[in-house]
Image (spheres, coloured by chain):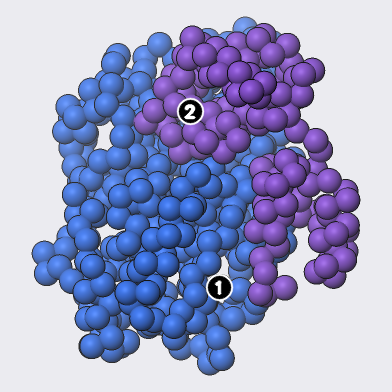
Chain colours: A purple, B blue
Amino acid sequence: MKDKLLLNILHEVQDKEGYLSEKSLKKISVEYNIPMSKLYSVATFYTMLRTKKQGKYVIELCGSPSCVLNKSREIEKFLERELKIEIGETSKDDLFSVYKTSCIGCCDEAPAMLVNGEPYTKLTVKRVKEILEELRKNANS
Amino acid sequence: MQILRETKLEGLRLARKVGRQKVLEILLKKKLGGRGGANFPVAKKWETALGVKADERYVICNADEGEPGTFKDKFILKNNFETMIEGLLIAAYVLRAKRCFIYLRGEYDYLREELEEKIKEVLEKSKMKVSIEIVRGAGAYICGEETAIIQSIMGNRGSSMYKPPHPTISGLWGKPTVLNNVETLTCVPQALVYEDWNPDYRLFSISGDVNHPGVYEWELGVKMSTILDVVKPREKIKAMSFGCFGGIMPVKKSSSVSQETICKGNCQHGAFSIIFIGERHNIVDICLSIAKFYTYESCGKCTPCREGTIRLVNLLKKIKSKKVNEGDIKLLKEFAEHIQETSLCGLGQSCGNHILTSLKYFKKDYMRYIK
């Protein structure tokens, strides 16, 4: 498949639907003549592609040494406590899925996280609390 | 900063005027090496791909800087992307390539729309009949490795492949393929246009326990005291880590930062990402967070790396539980050495560096946990 790149196709579907459902993958499989086994093999290799339903906001907290040195563990504990979940889970209200990720390249503004791909930097527990409140408000409006 | 100098398509104009061979000569004479860490001469790489008989060749810009502590390519993407595109176009011209790719790491996806617009603008101005496509990475560190990046673009899992063949001979879809990273490609037009272009300037990504982290440009051989004066440590600095893969060594103010001094300390400078570690931290903690990174990012293809990285984490956790003796520390060292010797690609081959160097320089931190 030289003309259309599979990674870009998968991303486009995930952008629209939030994750790569079996139904969407079947559609891609038929359209581009790629076996489902191959699609799952690729989709599950990359951490930013997800084959399970996600919360409205996917939070990826950076766990690299620069962020750890700048107290990212406090943020991690706060997120788990506040959302009553563990890393890798989705909150009961289906609003937040939280993951720990490798370096997101914001080491000069550590600690940092991505929310649906957008960077939030120089985090403190207070700031994360505000961010969560704002996201909740946006979700309800 | 030298890296921020704009060339406004003057480099491309010059390249077309003097011809392919002359461009290679200039780049060789100007000593432009790859900035991913290996410093392999750019002209030699291009020449090899150009020397292979093929109906198609590809150029890939590696914008997948995933090494923890590295953010200098993001700095270029944000501040001098046009010059980088020009470098890509010069590569395409020299290699007679019609299709170029920019493999943008998923973590930088928020920059993509702006980059796409700039690509369109520069392409229009250049009047070159070349396509530049952004490939959206998806959070796999291993895809910074050249064979893995190629697998990823072809729609496969991003696993490393055995070499040879090298991508310059047989890469994307079996065709000769040149891979250069963002910083290297940005240097290409700058080296062609500016007489006073200096090959020894490097971008440093500085982070950790300092008051002024950020991207800086210094000449190789810069004194550590100069760096510390600028970045202002917020506490006494105990160690520096070169990303995750380069190892951990003590900081000496009087030493200079160059390939020789770092390698002599058994570390690897890579892309000059320095994470300064303050005195209050135990190095074993830092090593554990680095070891976890490797278990997370191992592609799983070869056994030593897939299984070994997990064993390293377990051993470090065991050490931290204080239920160990000196034999376990010896085992940790042996494990790290074996994984490095037997792994397939650079990830596994460097995944023990932080352990081996920290055992060399900071054994005291480990001994705290020994019965």
Q: Are marks 1 and 2 in contact (CB under 8 Å)?
A: no
Inter-mark Cα distance, 1 to 2: 37 Å
Front residue of B225 and B341: B225
Report the amino acid beneath label 2: Tyr
Regarding mark 1 in the picture, which secondary structure is present there? Answer: loop
Residue ID for mark 2: A120
From the top left corner, tell me how far across and down residue B22 is, in percent: 25, 86
The answer to whether dots 1 and 2 both sit on one chain is no
Residue B370, percent from left and from top: 59, 11
Residue at image location 55% in from the left, 73% down from the top:
B167
Q: In which quadrant will I find the C terminus of chain A? A: top right
Residue B304: mark in rendering: none
Residue identifier under label 1: B167
Q: Nearer the viewer, residue B121 or B54?
A: B121
Residue found 42% across the figure and 67% down from its top: B120
**Residue placed furthest toward the left:** B196
In the image, B117: left or right of B340? left
User: Looking at the image, which residue sits at the far front?
Assistant: A141
Q: Mark 1 against mark 2, which lies toward the viewer?
A: 2
Residue B190 on image: x %, y %: 23, 66
Mark 1 residue type: Pro
Residue B125 visible in the shown view = yes
Q: Kindly indicate the quadrant of the structure image that contains residue A108.
A: top left
Q: Quadrant of residue A129?
A: top right
Q: Nearer the viewer, residue B311 or B11?
A: B11
Q: Position of residue A68 (x, y in %)?
A: 50, 22
| Chain label for disc 2 | A
Relative to B124, is B142 on the left or the right? right
Q: In this view of the protein, which residue sits in the foreground, B154 or B298?
A: B154
B126 versus B271 height, above or below = below
Binning the other alpha carbons within 10 Å of mark 2 as few (below 14), some (14 to 19) or many (20 upward) gives some
